[in-house]
Amino acid sequence: MKSFTKFIALILALAMVFALASCGKNDDENESATEKITTTKAVGASAKVDKSYFDDVVFVGDSVTLKLYYYDIKTDVLGNAAFLTSGSLGVTNCLWDLYAEKEVHPSYQGTKMRVPDGVKATGRSKVYIMLGMNDIYLYGIDSTIESLKTLAKEIKEKNPEAEFFMQSVTPIYGNKIAVTNDLVNQYNEKLILCCQQEKWKYIDVSSVLKDKNGELPLEYCGDPDAMGIHFSDAGCQVWADYLYIHTK
């Protein structure tokens, strides 16, 4: 009887060892998969491009990118880059008719136009888009991603040479608005997958604009007592520096 008990115990012990070994192998595989996503999810660092690179760039965005536009006017940091920006612009309302109620379409050279027409008017082929902050709380992440696909399709139809550079939505300072950094991170993760599927380039701007807690640092925030989402000049410079060395 004791021999039989020892035999059963030995079998159970071997089974446990096998299970642990298999578990460890799966963990290693999962870790490798995670590392692969981490290392391939964004455009990697490259040699710094010349300012002339931005002669063929148009930035599409909301009030966050609008701040970058104002900083560029003051410093010429991005050379002849074009901007299609508007406060409260989102992926969803980009799809609205030009004169829809409450539309916030951007203007280019004094003329209001939908983004696909605006990109065509600029004559630029590198389209840098940072949108989603104004959508994800109202419409949800999945709906925002689908709207982004639709917007890109419309841009491509009018601009066959368009190459897309999707910039991550950037972090927030404090808790002044309904959108949280956790929600922003969830959106960016879905955006990464979308970029992989659609063959777009993903620019992880948020990686250099967050502190150890994942928030926008105070020194990079231009409105810490208000919304906490817009950048200071220092934040804009960090953003621009990142763009110069993450292009390929």
Image (spheres, rainbow, N blue to C red):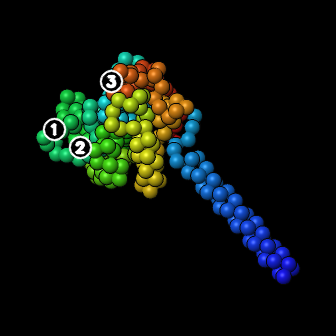
Q: Disc 2 designates what residue? A: 93
Amino acid under disc 1: Lys
Nearer to me, 28 or 61:
28
Q: Tell me what residue is drawn at x 22 percent, y 37 percent.
A: 105
Q: Disc 3 designates what residue? A: 226
Left or right, residue 30 beside residue 196: right
Q: Secondary structure at mark 1?
A: loop
Nearer to us: label 2 or label 3: 3
Q: CA distance from mark 3 to mark 1?
A: 23 Å
Amino acid under disc 3: Ala
Left or right, residue 167 beside residue 22: left
Q: Tell me what residue is drawn at x 47 percent, y 20 percent.
A: 219
- Residue 31 at x, y = what percent? 63, 53
Q: Tell me what residue is drawn at x 33 percent, y 33 percent.
A: 177
Amino acid under disc 2: Asn
Q: Disc 1 designates what residue? A: 102
Q: Mark 1 or mark 3, which is nearer the start of the sequence?
A: 1
On the question of residue 20 being in view, the answer is yes
Mark 2: few/some/many CA within 10 Å (<14, 14-19, 20+): some
- The quadrant holding residue 10 is bottom right
Asked whether the beta carbons under mark 3 and mark 1 sit within 8 Å of each other, the answer is: no
Asked whether the beta carbons under mark 2 and mark 1 sit within 8 Å of each other, the answer is: yes
Nearer to me, 181 or 166:
181
Left or right, residue 131 beside residue 205: left
Q: Mark 3 or mark 2, which is nearer the start of the sequence?
A: 2
Q: CA distance from mark 2 to mark 3?
A: 24 Å
Q: What number is the disc on residue 119?
A: none
Q: Tell me what residue is drawn at x 35 percent, y 53 percent.
A: 142
- Residue 63 at x, y = what percent? 31, 30
Above or below, 247 against 231 in this view is below
Q: CA distance from mark 2 to mark 1?
A: 9 Å
Nearer to me, 29 or 75:
29
